[in-house]
Image: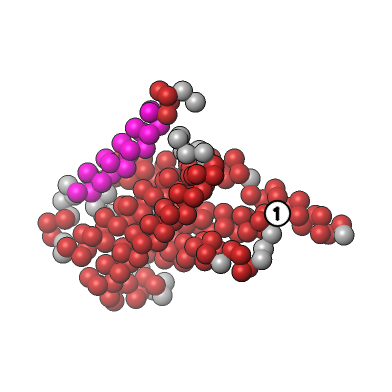
Amino acid sequence: MTVFRVILIWCAIAGVIGASLVVAAGSEYLPYRTPVYVAAGFAGVVALALLLVQPLLAAGLLPGFPMQAGRRIHRWTGVALMLAVAVHVVGLWITSPPDMVDALTFAAPTAFSAFGVVAMWALIAAALLAGIRKKLRLRPQVWRLAHTMAASVVVVGSVVHAILIEGTMGSVSKTLMCGLTIGAWALTVGRLKPWTGAWRGWRRQAQE
């Protein structure tokens, strides 16, 4: 990959993330919100930005970060993603506990709440799979497939949640960010093909 392409890709990623944050900072909703609500909203934007780079790091597709280095950073950005989601959820809980109870129990009348909660639980599942990987004693291929499936639910659920909600993110910047996030996820899954190793292992076991 040429230096020009590396710079171009990084500028595109930084531009989309930066534009989303700038648009959110200038949102007309902010003057009427409490500081805690604003922090919760920005944590959601940061979480979506991290979802954009997470799969690229895991597959070694982010320029300047080969597979091994990318996966090490992937673990740390995963921790950052968990923290961003925690701030998002706790902040919204502080500002409106009844709404959060309805969301967490799937009693909220808004569809975006359900997608957000499903994505949150899938993120917790993906994090637990990563944290207790050795204790589970799963074959690497099976673990990779399970982790990818959980991460896929996180990405799809988060993107639908972001698209449906009318918040601080602008419609254009939000759509662009969500589109790139889905694209990064699809590119990563298509490159890693986590199902192939698990399928070969199951076939081998069946033949024994």
Residue 11 at x, y percent in the picture: 34, 32
Instruction: Give above or below for 185 relative to 138.
Output: above
Q: Residue at x 70, y 48 (%)?
A: 196
Query: Was residue 45 drawn as part of the magenta stretch in this picture?
Result: no
Q: Chief secondary structure of the magenta span?
A: helix
Q: Residue 184 at x, y = what percent?
A: 48, 42
Say which quarter of the image contains residue 179. Answer: top left
**SS at mark 1?**
helix
- Label 1 neighbour load within 10 Å: few <14, some 14-19, many 20+: some
Relative to 172, does residue 86 appear above or below in the rendering?
Answer: below
Residue type, numbered disc 1: Ala
Question: Hey, which residue is sitting farthest left in the picture?
Answer: 31
Question: Residue 157 is drawn in which quadrant?
Answer: bottom left
The magenta-colored residue range is 7-25
Q: Report if residue 10 lies within the magenta region.
A: yes
Residue at the image position 49 percent from the left and 26 percent from the top: 1
Image height of 2 relative to 42, above or below: above
Please state if 191 lies on the left or on the right of 208 as rendered.
Answer: left
Q: Nearer the viewer, residue 155 or 53?
A: 53
Quadrant placement of the C terminus: bottom right
The number of discs equals 1
Q: Please state the horizontal and vertical placement of residue 151, each as a whole percent of the image.
A: 51, 55
Q: Is residue 122 visible?
A: no
The picture places residue 96, in percent across and down from the top left corner, at 25, 72
Which residue bears the numbered disc 1?
A: 198
Which residue is found at the position 29% from the left and 76% from the top? 98
Examine the rendering and report whether any part of residue 200 can be seen. yes
Q: Residue at x 54, y 42 (%)?
A: 67
